[in-house]
Amino acid sequence: MIEVKRPKEGFLSVFAYRMAPKEELFTRGHRACQGCAAALGLRLAMKAAGRNTIVVNATGCMEIVSSPYPYTSWAVPWIHVAFENAAAVASGIESAIKVLKRKGRLDPSKKINVLVFAGDGGTADIGLQALSGMMARGHNVTYVCYDNEAYMNTGVQGSSATPYGAHTTTTPAGKVKFGQGYWKKNLPEIAVAHGIPYVATACPSYPLDLIRKVKRSFELEGPAYIHMFAVCPTGWGIPPAYAIKAGRLAAETGVFPLYEVEHGRYRLTLDFEKGLKPVEEYLKFQRRFRHLTPEMIKLIQERVSAEYTRLKIMEETTNRPDYRSIAGI
Amino acid sequence: MAKRRGIEVSIAIAEAAALAEVDVVSAYPITPQTHIVEHLAELVANGELNAEFITVESEHTAMSAALGASLAGARAFTSTSSQGLALMNEIVYIASSMRAPVVMALANRSLSAPISIWNDHSDVMNERDTGWISIFANNGQEAYDLTFMAFKIGEHPDVLLPVMINFDGFILTHVVEPIYMFDKEEVEGFLPPYHHPYVLDPERPVTHGPVGLPDIYTEAKKQQEEAIRNSRKVIDAVWKEFDERFGRRYNAVETYKADDAEVVLVTQGSVTEAAQVVVDEMRKQGRKWGVVEIRLWRPFPFEDLKKALCNGSIKCAVVLDRAISFGGPLGIVMSEVRAALYNLSDRPMVVGVTAGLGGRDIRFDEYVRMFELGEECLKEEKEPDRVIIVGLRE
């Protein structure tokens, strides 16, 4: 049995969000819905990134709510171009910084972070090609996908990150079809397959864990992908006050495991020694899942258990001394 | 003094971008543009050009990355053709709207389907209303000069707009032509360093690309329209300065033997010089023909065109379109020329023709046919509504 050291703050962060930096760079006054976990996640990520950051935002909820001209919620340089190209724009900005430093037009000693925020539609669907290109080319960019599991900005349409069985306006639960008909695309694993230095999942319900992961992504040279769970009370049909609880239940049931992969080495940053809660606890209070039959819930449970087990195996395997010595990690 | 040497036009265009010391090149391969970016990649690989060459995964990303680089303070260049331009269309429109002075070398090629890698102007006409400054080159020398000058025009603080230089795919790109190439010392001081007033700089945070609600969108578009209209002053000034320093003159509308011509062919791109040869030959037979070229496509040179066509001599302007507007009057340039002259009582008749689609050569006799169509229309006193396709196999 391989012992894996888990970060304490992953556990602590549930309670100790006051330990986060005080400076607000994604500021109040934006127009996000009540209980929007994506907005909270951006705020926390910005605390981690700090002032020397250029933000690239894909079209989507967070872009719309934070920039209705002449207002802006951004205390850092921020750019929005289109829906599918945030990773491409970030590639250009990062290349510009690199060459301008080389030519002495920017101070070479000054670190400027490039941080992308894009939704699951802008990442898993329309923006996947641009993201893949950015990761393959090795741009020094941190890409945060805030995954609220559907096209929320346009009114809750299904994306390839919509979980199996979920009702959306384009995957409605009807008499012969029962919500989203296929399994959620595994974006973090697609990122891992690019062999980039850092991939992580995070959730604003675990604020210090999220902050630590964003910070870590900037410490490592090269592309980083952070898949951030973003509970959407509006789209999921839950009371806004339950957003944080829903995020915690997603982790506790294994529906959204919190882990990171640094140079190919897996680590669950939050594990539950007493085992996972049944997925039903997570599903049952969301309107988007209320039509699920016991058979469908059973299928989901099997899938979640298998994926969690796979992650544990990956963790075990990639932490074995023989693997680590060959892989040089 | 500049050296004149035989060089493939694509390589010369790449050298023009290198002469401008571009900081970021982001481009994707597509025929017939590819030699341009291949050469730039070589220059970067050999350390002859200190730039970042981004091997993007699509043209959409090529333009997106160029836009991002431009607003991050880097001089950005890209090049494409045809389907590549069509794919990047979304960001082409945004680049001008976000005032990113990217320079794009556009090797004009037809659009699918059927797929055709050869030359016409359907790609650029498809992007007519994207808010870019758009200029046509007739030969390699012009493509080289105009590409170099494009940076100075687009980056001017009164302009801050992207510029596309059009040159015909294969007909120009793959031709070896004697071209006067500058060395760095010669152009010293001509092109100032790139400076954008609103770069993405953590010291001075700016918000680029916010949401334009209905109460501001119209005003934003009006400002953009004014910007491209006003760019004309800068374009003229840059061309004048270039002429004074290097002795080559560029005009928004170029004329050839039009002063005493009765019929002129209105052209864009490499057909211009071919038409000039036809005019020279046919003038020997007493035909009073000439050529008027619309070099500056956007901003459209209304006054220059009126002046060129309403010179008291020209009775008929035959406009040669290299693209088709389906279901409309067919001719895009023809429609614009007609509209530009609409309210003038002394305007010449405007007749539209199209030819040379998808790389088909336009033969000598077909040029003659175009002029003669103009003469026939004059005789019949009838201005056709739609363009006539010349060289069509029935």
Image (cartoon, coloured by chain):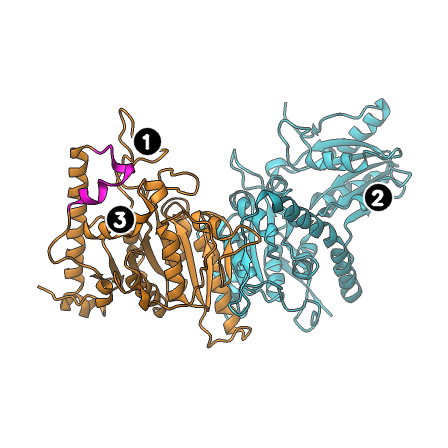
The numbered mark 1 sits on a residue in which chain?
A
Q: In the rendered image of this protein, does residue B48 appear above or below residue B92?
A: below
Return the residue nearer the eye: A116 or B376: A116
* Placement of the N terminus of chain B among the 4 image quadrants: bottom right
In the picture, the disc for residue B308 is: 2
Label 3: state its secondary structure.
helix
Evaluate whether label 3 is on the same chain as label 1: yes
Cα separation between marks 2 and 3: 71 Å
Q: Mark on residue A246? A: 3
Q: Which chain is cyan?
A: B
For residue A126, what is the image quadrant?
top left
Q: Which residue is mark 1?
A: A172
Percent from the top left, x then y, of residue A30?
Answer: 47, 53
Could you say which chain is coloured orange in the image? A
Q: Position of residue B41 (x, y in %)?
A: 50, 62
Mark 1, secondary structure of its residue: loop
- In the picture, the disc for residue B171 is none
